[in-house]
Image (cartoon, grey):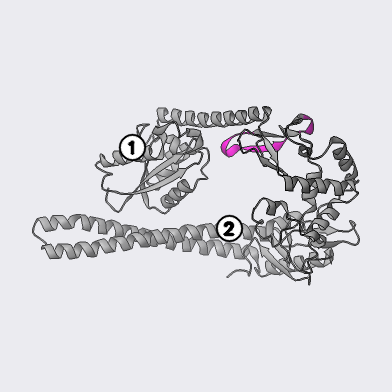
Amino acid sequence: MMGNQVTAIYLRLSIEDDGDRDESNSISSQRMLIESYIHHSKDLCESRVVEYCDDGYSGTSMERPGIKALLEEVKKGKVHCIIVKDLSRFSRDYITSGDYLDQIFPFMGVRFISINDGYDSKENKGSTMEMDTAFKTMLYDFYSKDTSVKVMAAHKKKQEQGVYMGMEPLGYIRDPKGKGGLSLVPEQAELVRRIFDMALGGMSAQQIAVRLQEEGTPTPVQLRGRKLPEGKKHPIWDRSVIRTMLNNRFYLGEMIYNKYVTTGVGRDHKRRKRPREEWKAIPDHHDAIITEEEYQQVVSIGKPQIQRRKKHPLIGVLICGGCGYHIARKGMEYQNNYFRCTRKYTTKAPECVDNIPVEIIEEAVLLELTNEIMLWGDPEKSLEDMQRQGKQQLSVLRKTAREYHDRKRSAEKRLAGLYEQYSSGELTSGEYMDKKTETAGELAECDKKESEKWEEYYEYQEGLKKLESDMKNIIRFSHIETLTEEIVETFIDKIYLHNDKRMEIVWKFQTGGAE
């Protein structure tokens, strides 16, 4: 293997490996083992070695920065060999390991070595994944799932013992002694007490939020020293936060747990809420801020009978251009319907959207969408032309990349033969050095150009897939008469609405028609 070919070493360590006690799995020990293996390997010792590492990531998922960077280089054709300490470093998922070892790496021409498993794909052609190796990867998969189950069981046991595992509600801080208890934060607890007092006095969640905003009372985000969510311009008191606080039995000194059930582990991980009757509670777990009587009174006050109506398709994508928060629909179902910023009466900011009729926005969005679709002319013909041109362009890029690859291989052979020519006296020392420098430069340039062309190829391929998907959606919805939730979800990412009825639509598809 020549020095320009890359041997990638991959290292991984996560909490499931219990690294503090198992030094054999540490990053440094993995590195030493692999480097020693390369040093003693005749066909690897002269290769260029590049290290990829994921420290603190589970092997059950391939969503790891190190492994993603490595696979990206594999896709570009830059990596010729991958070496790991054992298969569990690469992946603890049996199916994923099999896909890469049996199909992807052989197709890409990548050699894979797992030292402790005694596995080398170069020696196992035709039977890439032997039974012993397959059995081990299945055990790794089982071990990882078993570890996840044990972690969940340990969390549940801690909760049963009164250890609080979640984020502390406003008014509390985790016990600095680290025993899972909670202590009151006097200033925050006083604010919580005042919010309940305002509710007991008959104020609604909206009125409480407005009062606190007018007084300039720091919000929970500010009190905890956190940053505002992306796109939000002002820290504000939100009525939904107030409602959550007023309905939280935590302020009675009660710790609720067993609210959620987790099914599956790793990439199959799912979390859903249990029925309320299955929740469990530990009374007198921490200092209370309110009494049971006060809580029941507040809850009973805040239970108006609301007639639910159908959600408007634009709700969720409409954002106030004044403050960056979402816009809500107000009014009756079929009359006095208008959009308004959900924070308008909290912030009292003049730039926030206030009472813009729903039908005006619906018509404007529908018109903009229809115009964008019409720019594509005959969408079916545009799709055929685009697919034909796309295939041609991909073919050109692939051909160019392969030409650079062939030129690189030719330069490698010439470079390898130069020393023999020098040794046999065909070249003088000066001629040898000149030709070596020239050929090495040509080799480096071809390697760079090949990588650039493959990168351009894959980027174009991804863009083509996205464009094909867009075109199929345009064909499917070529005659839109009204906005539906499906249409909005397909074509619209965000709509920034301003108080003067200006709109800035962020589309999910390529606009401007065929280029």
Q: Which mark is residue 263?
A: none
Residue at 28% across, 63% down: 442
Above or below — where is 392 with respect to 37? below
Can you tell which of label 1 and label 2 is closer to the viewer? 1
Residue at 66% across, 69% down: 377
For the residue pair 189 and 88, the one nearer the viewer reads as 189
For the residue pair 210 and 477, the one nearer the viewer reads as 210
Residue at 48% across, 31% down: 140
Q: Quadrant of residue 193?
A: top right
Image x and y of residue 199, in percent: 87, 47
- Classify 10 Å Cα crowding around label 1: few (below 14), some (14-19), many (20 and above): some
> In the rendered structure, are the residues bearing label 1 and label 2 in contact, judged by CB atoms less than 8 Å apart?
no
Range shown magenta:
263-277
Is 179 left or right of 349, judged from the image as shown? left
For the residue pair 158 and 111, the one nearer the viewer reads as 158
| Element type where label 2 sits in the image | helix
- Give amino acid for label 2: Lys
Q: CA distance from mark 1 to mark 2?
A: 43 Å
Q: Which residue is farthest front?
A: 186
The question of residue 270 being in magenta is answered with: yes
Above or below — where is 448 with respect to 103? below
